[in-house]
Every structure is written in structure tokens, then in C-alpha cells.
Amino acid sequence: MSEVAASPSSRPHCDTCSAVCCRLTVLLGPEDRIPSHLTAELSGGQPVMARDEQGWCVALNHAQMSCSIYEDRPTICRRFTMGGPYCRDVRKTYLSQLRAGIPLTQYG
Ligand code: SF4
Ligand code: SF4
């Protein structure tokens, strides 16, 4: 992933981002209808989107850096605002991790 794509100084836009928000823990609610092979459970039993070995949500299409279940994506994903404070914050954290050489396999 390029640093430019996650740079906090650049204007955030999903078309030029490394889908950084798709590395966050995606909690699922009862209204979400996600195929079970794409989900996991936290230690407390809370259903979440499963992650791949690099920390991205397993529903992410890496070739296009887009959501493969976009029409049926979880509620929490629908509410995530491009360019909002959480978007900017996660991009900043991701860039710091890249620059510090912290392996992408370490995520919160
Ligand atoms: S919402 Fe923000 S962090 Fe997520 S893909 Fe778009 S620009 Fe990147
Ligand atoms: S369900 Fe789609 S939008 Fe939500 S984190 Fe996964 S890939 Fe991203």
C-alpha cells in the first residue's frame, strides 16, 4: 500500500485510499445479514467481520480495493463517513504504522 493513499495531508477519498477503514473491527448487529464464512466472533461472543492475515476485512476485494458485498455491507460500514474524523484518524494511524515499519499483521 502506498503512503500517498493514506496520507493525512491529502484529501481523503475512497477512490484513492488503501481502504484503511476496512482494517477496523467491524461489529455486526442483528440487522446485518452477512454470510457466515465472512464472519468471526470476538472472545466475548460479539459477531464481527472476519479479517485476513494482513488485517483487512475478508470482504475486501484487494484487486480493486473495494467492498465485495457493498450492497449488503454492515450498518457500521454504511455509517462510516469519508473524510470524517474517524476516517482521518484511521488513515493517520495507518500511515504512522507504515512509516515506523510496524508489520501490517499488527492491528487494533
Ligand atoms: S472512508 Fe476514509 S479510510 Fe475508508 S476508504 Fe474512504 S477515505 Fe479511506
Ligand atoms: S464489509 Fe465491506 S465496507 Fe465493511 S469493512 Fe468489509 S470490505 Fe470494508
Image (tube, rainbow, N blue to C red):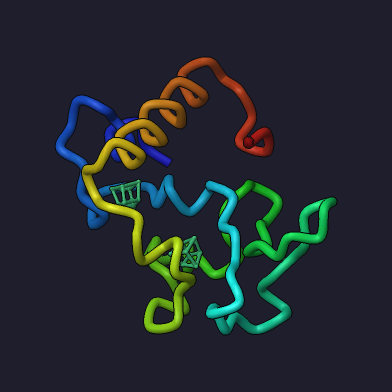
Identify which residue, 30 or 60, lies in the foreground: 30
96 or 24: nearer the viewer: 24
Residue 2 higher or lower than 45, as above or below: above
Seen in the image, is 11 located left or right of residue 14? left
* Apparent side of residue 32 relative to residue 95 in the rendered image (left or right): right
Q: Position of residue 69 (x, y in %)?
A: 46, 79
- Who's the residue at 82% across and 53% down the image? 44
Residue, far front: 30
Q: Position of residue 48 (x, y in %)?
A: 66, 62
Q: Residue furthest left?
A: 11
The image quadrant that residue 31 belongs to is bottom right
Work out which quarter of the rendered image holds the C terminus and state it.
Answer: top right
At x 55%, y 70%, the residue is 59
Residue 11 relative to residue 18: left or right: left
> Would you place residue 3 above or below residue 69 in this image?
above
- Which residue sits at x=45%, y=20%? 96
- Figure disc tally: 0
Question: What residue sits 64% from the left and 29% below the top?
Answer: 103
Towards the viewer: 95 or 35:
35
